[in-house]
Image: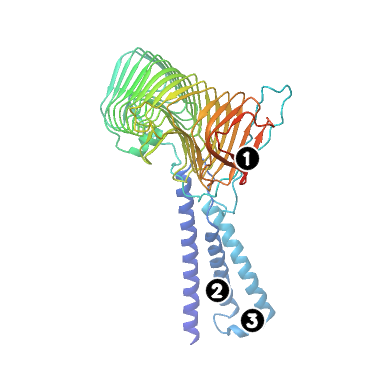
Amino acid sequence: MDRRAKNYLSYVAVILLTYFLGLTILSASEEHTLIQRLNPESAPQIGMGYYLLIALLGALLLCAIAWIYLSRKNAKTFKEVLQTKKGQTVFACSGISGALLSCLASLGLIGSLPAMPHHADLTPSVAINDSTEASEQEVSSTSVYIPPIPELPPIKPAENHIELAKGIQTIANQQTITDLIESNQPDLSCVLGLEGSHITIDSSILQKSGDSTVLEDALLFGVNGALVAAPGSTLNVLATRIETNGLANTGVVVNGLNATASLTGSDVLTNALHSPAYFAGYQGQLKVTEGYSSTQGDASAIFVPQSTAIIEAQSLNANTLGLDSPLVLAQGILKGSNINATIDRSVLAKIKSGGDVTLSDSKFTVGAMQAETDEHAIFVMENRDQSEKQDWTVLNLNNNEWIVPTTSPASNDAFCFVIDHVGAQIELINNAIYQVPQLAKVSAGKLNLNCIQQILQGPLVADQDSEVNMNLTQSSIFTGSINANQACPKVKLSLDESSQIVLTDNIYVSEFNNANATNTNITTNGFHIFVNGNPVV
């Protein structure tokens, strides 16, 4: 091959290597941007494969340039070039420098470090309280393990689209509203509070219709809600009726930093699909006191606190009629007390990874149906799409009552708790549970169940990828079985002297602790407690 042809090939190689290097960096940057847009709270990292390819292309590119220089534009052969120490040194330095420089340059262009292997470490402590002993017992930390879950792009977008909201009345100052306000246009709220606004709505009526044109904006940000508090706004709602009738028409939306709203003695009614009563997101804070709330459509919860947001509710009556319409759909914080609710065709609460729900002194009638899985349950703690950050879900229940009516299809096989691909920390204190035949089902997850003055019944089942830790204290009573099919390898059961267990089938655990050394607080009914396959009771 003549020298001119070699020059042509050398220059083509440099151009192609530059092109593919730029293409790889652009592809990695687009993936990083996509992940960041979908999950605003994450620090996304790009796969190591991108950086290995970038390093290889950078090394080859500088080596190709070094070849053109050392060979004097192909006047020398490759063998002649490598015979000199200068040629060997320049080639070696070019390869190393090319790999390093291309990776360092791409860090700024991509905006992400390469993903490094890691393992989740979720190790909460569960305290065991014993009222019969004078001295405090040392609380042991229980290290538990969730099977590794693939990291997929989460479904949450990055920017807060609440800035797209518009209103019949858009307010940025101090104002009081006492009139009827109607909106029948898509994406147009009745009242929109902007930054710096202090709005009082007293004895008014807000009526919203008009379907949302962008469903994602409505579901994830509350755009098209009847009453919207945007970042930096304050709402005070008194004795007001808020009603919506269009697709994805949320009743009250509080979204953004320093966005706050307080509702007292007000009614919120929604009548269409994807229309929750109350939505809080992006550090918004909402407090609801007294009044009545109702949703008629499917996929329309009463309370929807998103991640980093807080909703407080007390002395409230509520009702949902649609499928997949729980009282609570939480990825943020919900604190409720003195709530009287009827959930006709859904579970009572659905808690996503990172959600934290506290309910006290409340009464619930629950249809206990979960539409997408056909499972029957009261409380569902899940991460089924396996795309969210693997934080624990937290559920605290104190002095509540719940019942599944005999007319519900779930009355014969409902579980109190279903834990699906997530870690669940549950504390029960003196709750009354009626007509719920099964206690808990754990699928590829972890359950820490702490019972204080609590009466429970029904089987607890878990699969081979799960872990269970159950503590009975302060006169708690459990009637049922645990891991009767022996599927779950890690089950820990503990009880103090004041608590009791009544067996309805065998219990299979990996660790068993009973403060009563004689086991007289256990009624076997002919069954046994097995520890690692050996009967101990």
Which quadrant holds residue 117?
bottom right
Q: Nearer the viewer, mark 1 or mark 3?
A: 1
Q: Residue 218: horizontal and vertical position, in percent? A: 36, 34
Crowd rating for badge 2 (residues with CA inside 10 Å; few <14, some 14–19, many 20+): many
What residue is drawn where x is 61% and y is 62%?
100
Q: Amino acid at mark 1?
A: Thr
Crowd rating for badge 3 (residues with CA inside 10 Å; few <14, some 14–19, many 20+): some
> Separation of disc 2 and disc 3 at Cα?
14 Å
Identify the mark nearer the N-term, 2 or 3: 2
Which quadrant holds residue 293?
top left
Residue position marked by numbered label 2 in the rendering: 64
Residue position marked by numbered label 3 in the rendering: 82
Total labels: the figure holds 3
Q: Is residue 406 above or below residue 375?
A: above
Crowd rating for badge 1 (residues with CA inside 10 Å; few <14, some 14–19, many 20+): few
Q: Amino acid at mark 3?
A: Leu
Please indicate whether residue 436 sits to the left or right of residue 270 in the image: right
Question: Is residue 463 at all visible to an observer of this figure?
Answer: yes
* Label 3 residue SS: helix
User: Quarter of the image containing the C terminus?
Assistant: top right
Question: Is residue 350 at all visible to an observer of this figure?
Answer: no
Residue position marked by numbered label 1 in the rendering: 123
Q: Nearer the viewer, mark 2 or mark 1?
A: 1
What residue is drawn where x is 56% and y is 27%?
477
> Separation of disc 2 and disc 1 at Cα?
52 Å
What residue is drawn where x is 55% and y is 60%?
51
